[in-house]
Image (cartoon, grey):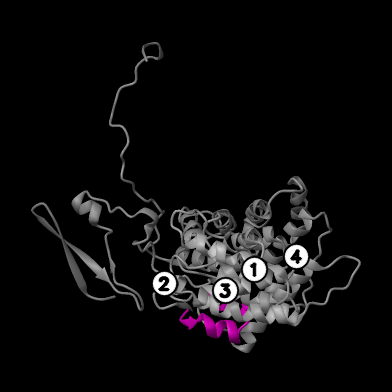
Amino acid sequence: MADKTIYLQVDEARHELPLLSGSLGPDVIDIRRLYAETGLFTYDPGFTSTASCRSSITYVDGDNGILLYRGYPIEQLAEKCDFLEVCYLLLQGELPKGSEMRNFVTSISQHVMVHEQLTRFYSGFRRDAHPMAILVGVVGALSAFYHEVIDINSKEDRYLSAIRLIAKMPTLVAMCYKYSIGMPFIYPKRKLGYAENFLRMMMADPYDDYIANPVLVRALDRILILHADHEQNASTSTVRLAGSSGANPYACVAAGIACLWGAAHGGANEAVLNMLEEIGDVSRIGEYVNRAKDKNDPFRLMGFGHRVYKNYDPRAKLMRQTCHEVLSALNLHDDRLFKLAMELERIALEDDYFVQRKLYPNVDFYSGIVLRALGIPTEMFTAIFALARSIGWIAQWDEMISDPELRIGRPRQLYQGVITRDVTNISAR
């Protein structure tokens, strides 16, 4: 924290505002005393210029295309670690040693099952319910099954809740899918790895053995790593805001899932596939690229550019590599939709219009293609995003609860409504 001060002149009074420095990123003006001293609020729609908390979990530098988990570059984590190692890192702050990792995996494997009564919740939903609608409900319901160990002031209870959430999310998400297609639930196998277990629960039939392709397992594991956390985005901020009231962790994560469901947040990779279906064929790419360049045309190329990254999204580089590995392993380079996507990618990386505006393919562009190649239906994409992001949410929640500066979230507003007026009797209105 730097010993700096900026000054704000309000009428005749001069006010001192501390300037705080983090280990990375821009300095932050501490305005906590602003209202008390000046009677003024700040105005920041979308909180795009507001630091809502202190955090040591994730750092994003959008201008330079950098993403760090606990200081480790995402590129190194995706190449050298598996998802559960990253989960341990986000929760504990350090990468695990061998014995620590074995104990962590054992803890996860002991909690992969869900209570049989919880499986009956699914039958209460319409068979055509969106998987995210179901997931919001069943994750929130976990608090009804583990209410005796969700004391948010207990470090041990918080850790156990995190373990349970990481362990059960693949089971719950896979059950959402099986329920939607009218197939029996496939229960987890403790001896399988995290991503492999999830693929089996998604794809296996009760009457058939399922052996996952290692390339596909690694691809899914990488998707989970790349989506594990992304600083104070909309859903993470939702989890923190809900948690600031003292709500239990499962309710907070359910709130995060509900926020992620929004098309502007978690639905981007689904929108990519819908866009590719709309374009339909390689021969029509030129037409749609021209439409994307026309500011009067409402059409937008989905999966290009990013609100935070003004450079190439570091996750997209890794997802691009994974995408081509999967397409090669499954011999899908001649598939109509994949050929279309690869040609669109080539044009976007070479066309001056996109390059000058830094509209590079982002992680959603490639992850949607990979998930489709894995045989996962489009409506499940956001649920898998929620599965990945659950570790980030619970790590951020735990950090917030441990913060001595924690206060219930209470944003203020710029009121522009009608001024005070009197109520008249209904007969006189």
* Residue 68 drawn in magenta: no
Q: Amino acid at mark 4?
A: Met
Residue 345 — which label?
3
Q: Which residue is mark 4?
A: 113
Q: Which residue is mark 1?
A: 282
Q: Where on the picture, by quarter, is residue 215?
A: bottom right
> Which callout, 4 or 1, points to the residue nearer the camera?
1
User: Helix, strand or loop at disc 3?
Assistant: helix
Between 279 and 386, the one lying in front of the other is: 279
Q: CA distance from mark 4 to mark 2?
A: 42 Å
Residue 134 — which label?
none
Q: Is residue 291 above or below residue 223?
A: above
Q: CA distance from mark 4 to mark 3?
A: 41 Å
Crowd rating for badge 4 (residues with CA inside 10 Å; few <14, some 14–19, many 20+): some
User: Helix, strand or loop at disc 4?
Assistant: loop
The residue stretch that appears in magenta: 70-92
Name the dominant secondary structure of the magenta segment.
Answer: helix
